[in-house]
Amino acid sequence: MPRAEHRAERQNLIARSAAEIIADEGIEGATFRAIAQRSGLSKGVVEHYFSGKQDIIRKTQEWINQQALSREQRATRRKRGLAAARARMLSLMPVNRELISEWKIRIHYWSSAIASRDEQLGMSLRITGARERFSGDLQQAVADGEIPAGTNIQAATNVLLHLLAGVSCNQLADPTYYTRKYQVTLIDDCLNRLQSGRGLPL
């Protein structure tokens, strides 16, 4: 295996192991020793690839964001308009164990990143990217006649993002209430309101 590929593979293994620990125990549990044990590598190898704990946390967040984006792209392939928006929502909301873990990591990361201007900028850029993708879906839905031409795309996009973040955070606090079935119902209700021209609450 070429050296660059070997390095990337090990970094991904470490990031995945750190992600599992953060999801289970929080950021405090993601020590070099714990990550090494979980990944099956030595503590020295983990230290070789990452400059410190914050570097691991940042790379772990980048890794789960890339996983989420890849899954989103697969979910929306050959879909457009409202079908794409629905698939995009379902690929991101905590409707299964993997996505619940991702949201746990995301919340832990947000709590540690809120004091860093650089990290806040990164978060803002990721939200902007998501807003653009959802906005593209809704613009296509207007072009295809699925939703009324006068729909406020920016406001509707924001409602979908607020639903995504709000329900995802609430699911972690009350998983028995925010079941997969209920999450799907909330998504479909929003999209049906858009389709009928009733609009969405802001």
Image (tube, rainbow, N blue to C red):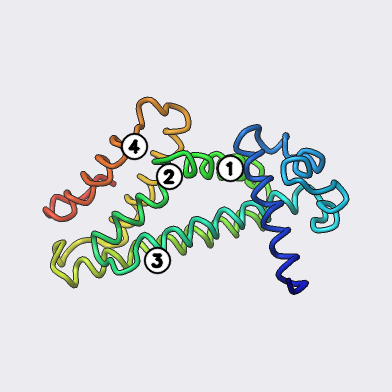
Answer whether labels 4 and 3 touch (C-beta < 8 Å).
Answer: no
Q: In the shown orientation, is residue 104 left or right of residue 8?
A: left
Q: In the shown orientation, is residue 125 left or right of residue 187?
A: right
Q: State the residue position of label 2.
A: 165
Q: State the residue position of label 1.
A: 105
Q: State the residue position of label 3.
A: 132
Q: In the shown orientation, is residue 31 left or right of residue 60?
A: right
Amino acid type at mark 1: Ile
Q: Residue at x 34, y 63 (%)?
A: 76
Amino acid type at mark 4: Arg
Tell me which numbered mark, 4 or 3, is placed earlier along the sequence.
3
Residue 137 image point, x, y percent: 29, 65
Give the residue furthest to the front.
1
Dot 1: element: helix
Residue 145 image point, x, y percent: 13, 68
Tell me which numbered mark, 2 or 4, is placed earlier along the sequence.
2
